[in-house]
Image (tube, grey):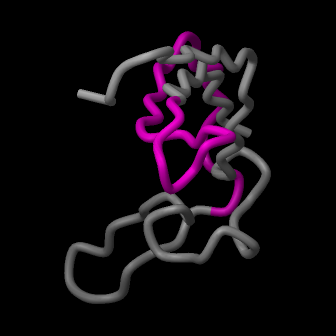
């Protein structure tokens, strides 16, 4: 399974419509990628000069082999609170 570990930054401010605050911008940063091995169930495309491709290129997520599946882990969420000013 290929794993993407990310850090998420949420920028929050309060405005007249949302006095308790709301996120007005969210950004994500990939901090680590853990690769898996080669495809366990490659698919052969028919025709002259048949070619084998990874199952991830043809199948939906739930039908892929273990090595072709993708997982996203949020390792940290940081909140940036804007006080006393409008969001830019």
Residue at x-position 50% and y-position 20%: 30
Looking at the image, residue 55 lies above or below residue 27: below
Query: Left of 39 or right of it: where is 88?
Result: left
Percent across and percent down for residue 25 are 41, 36
**58 and 26: which is toward the camera:** 26
Looking at the image, residue 15 lies above or below residue 27: below
Q: Decide whether residue 2 is among the magenta residues.
A: no
**75 and 20: which is toward the camera:** 20
Q: Decide whether residue 26 is among the magenta residues.
A: yes
Query: Left of 46 or right of it: where is 38?
Result: right
Looking at the image, residue 83 lies above or below residue 26: above
**22 and 61: which is toward the camera:** 22
Region of the chain picked out in magenta, as a range: 13-41
Q: Main secondary structure of the magenta part?
A: strand
Q: Is the C terminus in the top left, top right, bottom left or bottom right quadrant?
A: top left
Residue at x-position 47% and y-position 35%: 26
Q: Quadrant of residue 2?
A: top right
Percent across and percent down for residue 1 are 74, 39
Percent across and percent down for residue 68 are 64, 50
């Amino acid at each position: 399974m290929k794993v993407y570990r990310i850090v998420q930054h949420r920028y929050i401010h309060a405005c007249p419509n949302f006095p308790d605050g709301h996120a007005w911008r969210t950004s994500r940063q990939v901090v680590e990628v853990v690769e898996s091995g080669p495809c366990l169930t490659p698919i052969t495309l028919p025709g002259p000069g048949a070619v084998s491709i990874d199952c991830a290129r043809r199948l939906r997520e739930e039908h892929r082999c273990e090595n072709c599946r993708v997982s996203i882990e949020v390792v940290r969420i940081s909140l940036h609170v804007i006080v006393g000013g409008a969001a830019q």
